[in-house]
Image (spheres, grey):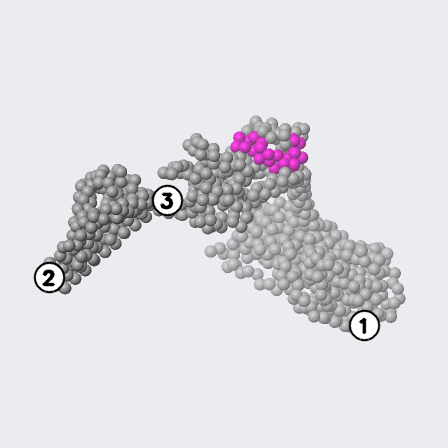
Amino acid sequence: MSTSTTPSPWAHVTPGNLLPGLATLAALGIGSLLAWPRLARAIFASDFLPHAYCYLKEPALVWTHVISDSTIGIAYLAISINLAYLVYRGRRDLPFHWMVLAFGLFIVACGLTHFVEALTVWVPVYVLSAILKVFTALISLITAIALPFTVSPLLTMIHRARDCEEHEREVARAEAKFRGLLEAAPDAVAVTNPEGEIVLVNHQVERLFGYRREELLGHPIEILLPQHPPGVHSAHRSQFFASPQSQPLGASLELLGVHKNGSEFPVEVSLSPLQTKTGLLVSSAIRDVSERKREQEALKQSEERFRRLVEDVRDYAIFSLDPQGNITSWNLGAERMKGYQAEEIIGRHFSCFYPEDDLRQGKPAQELRTAIAEGRVEDEGWRVRKDGSKFWANVVITALRDSGGNLKGFSKLSRDITVRKRIQDQLEALNQDMVRRNAELLAMNKELESFSYSVSHDLRSPLRHIAGFSQLLLEEHSAELSFEAQRYLQRIREGTSRMGQLIDELLGLARLGRQELKVQVTSLKPLVEEVLRDVIQEKPGHPIDWIIHPLPYLDCDPLLMKQALTNLLSNAVKFTSQQDHPIIEIGSMPGNPQPVIFVRDNGVGFSMKYADKLFGVFQRLHRPEDFPGTGVGLATVQRIIQRHGGRVWAEAELGRGATFYFTLGRENGTPNADALTSHIPVSDELEAARGTTAG
Amino acid sequence: MAQLPVEILLVEDNSDDIELALHALRRGGLANRVEIVRDGEQALDFLFCRGLYRHRSLAQPPRVVLLDLKLPKADGLQVLKELKSNPVTRPIPVVILTASREEQDLVRSYQLGVNSYIQKPVDFEQFRRTVKELGMFWLVINQPPPQAAFQVG
């Protein structure tokens, strides 16, 4: 053992080289004792009284000393063994370990002194005891002298240790903060060292890639982001490490990420430098962009579909303009309509489609202004094709804005409606024509009205004069007139009377056309009964078998309907007048949309070949001698039914009676004639064919 | 005859009609005190006692006026309107005797307050019967308006 007070030589003392030293020292000591027995004898001389005597062999005192000294010795030994073990384990990390060893030696020495002290109670080896004490004193002295020299560096060391601890706590706090931030980051973040090994990941990385944290640390980042396309990632990284400042890799890279299960997915990676104590690290923020990619892809596809759709539309010219009105896209319809190919028109101003008049008035610009102000503008007008020909177009210009409301341009949709325009013009002309005709018709109607008024007033007067004076002639000058002359006058009278009747009926028919229709829901039955009373009154004593079936309600003008029924029933009465058993039947049957009313008689009937003449004015199918009449009755019926929007028709057979049908409102389909007429009783007398037929 | 009050005022422009009407009246024994005027204006002069007829007295109106509708100058409806809108002449019975059976004429006449409307039949026999019955009714059966009816106020 060196007694040097400077700690530096001790710095090399290690338990490894200390123990052999101690062993050598012990061997030397034992060797010297064996080599020199006298020395041994001198040392171990026990000619003295053992210490027990000093204690008067008082056992309590003796054992107290022995036990205490032994205990102290054992304790000192244990302490020094601990210290030795500490130095041995702590190696060089233990500061001032030579001091510890010195303490250890000092304590061992003290321990030995106490052991020998205990021994000397019975064995009086005082020389040994003295030597040990000298040794112990030396060691103690050396330690005591060396100690002050170590106080200052020890204090420094203690301070340093405290600073160090503080710093470490700070670092730990910063690191905790950093980790917190890392974990809170929405993106998966992996931190790599310059070798590309993962040194730190957050929870999102575990979630995104399916690895546990410990499976990643120390592994290359390529297991998460392989070089795909090859070289990209490492190339970027090495470039990045080469000059982190000039390489703003904050701009994101689009790479493929690989999940633990092998599936690949698109990620967006942004790299940023991380200056640390241990060097420059790279933090990679990784974002799963599968969803965004899908959306973008869907949007792209939808845009593509829409673009194709627009391109393929043939009947509409669809194109777009930039905010200044220059054409930026051109579809097939536009090509067809305007005659320009896409490549020759794109980039030109859309005003080239306008005729000169519109250009002079600044219409193209005006339309864009309106589209900007109101969102869209619609216009119809002439447009010019490439070849200079014109077409009438319907145009819609819509302002296109981005989400921020900034004008991006316009879409323009045009339709060639020249044909429609032409038809519209024609329609308008026709309409005007119709308005004019209507006015003419009204005027004509007015004229007709005054005409019939005139007829009513003026035509009848001369007739009355003829009738009056011929009557007076007959009455007052009959004596002067031959029989023949009187007969002629009689014929004149009859003629005037008939003409008067004709004029009245004709005026009545004319009035029907002008008269306003007063339609109301009308029960047909009372109307028929009323008519029947009048008709029967006209022809008293005529034994007619009336069959009245249930009758419906009709929407009609009751007065006109009564007139129509009067004419029909009068007719039936008239044409059955020569029957022995006249039967007249009135009824209805379902029709579409309105019921069909019929009046059936078993009279003389008529031949169906004259059916088309039946309803004509002054059309008669008989001689007046057989059946009187003016030929206005059925014309009146037809006029009334037609004014109700209905239809009247008849079915008959010569000598077998006739049936007249009418229905109000438009109907579809005519009832079966045979089914309706088959049961009409046939009168034998009527079988005798007549030259004329009933009507 | 001139001093006796007129019983019938016949307003008719057509001479044939006048002759036939007079004939019929005569046959009915009613032609004694008939005054004939040939247009609407004359009719109004007669009834309001002015112009040619200013010597007449409003107090002696005709028992009945037979009025044609189609007349020169003021037509029948105009005459009717003036008569019926004036309290002095309103009580005078007015019978429209016309060829027309147009509804508009009937409507207008009754709206203006006509007392009767008769269409002249074409047949003379019928006409004669009609005129006779008409005269009988207005001159014999019908009670004429009393004097008080003509006093205004």
Q: Are marks 3 and 2 in contact (CB under 8 Å)?
A: no
Give me the disc on residue A581.
1
Residue A346: image location, x then y, percent: 60, 30
- Give the spatial CA distance, label 3 vs label 2: 77 Å
Residue A375 in the image: above or below residue A550: above
Nearer the observer, A475 or A165: A165
What amino acid type is highlighted by mark number 1? His
Numbered range of the magenta stretch: A315-341
Drawn side of residue A326 relative to residue A35, left or right: right
Residue for point 24% across, 39% down: A7
Give me the disc on residue A178.
3
Q: Which residue is mark 2?
A: A56
Chain under callout 2: A
Labels 2 and 1 share a subunit: yes
What amino acid type is highlighted by mark number 2? Leu
Locate residue A474: give its quadrant: bottom right
Q: Are marks 2 and 1 in contact (CB under 8 Å)?
A: no
As for residue A316 lying within the magenta part, the answer is yes
Q: Nearer the viewer, mark 2 or mark 1?
A: 2
- Give the spatial CA distance, label 2 vs label 1: 187 Å
Residue B53 in view here: no
Name the secondary structure under disc 1. loop
Residue A324 in the image: above or below residue A515: above
What amino acid type is highlighted by mark number 3? Phe
Residue for point 64% across, 56% down: A517
Position of the C terminus of chain A, as image quadrant, is bottom right
Residue A151 in the image: above or below residue A605: above
Q: Nearer the viewer, mark 3 or mark 2?
A: 2
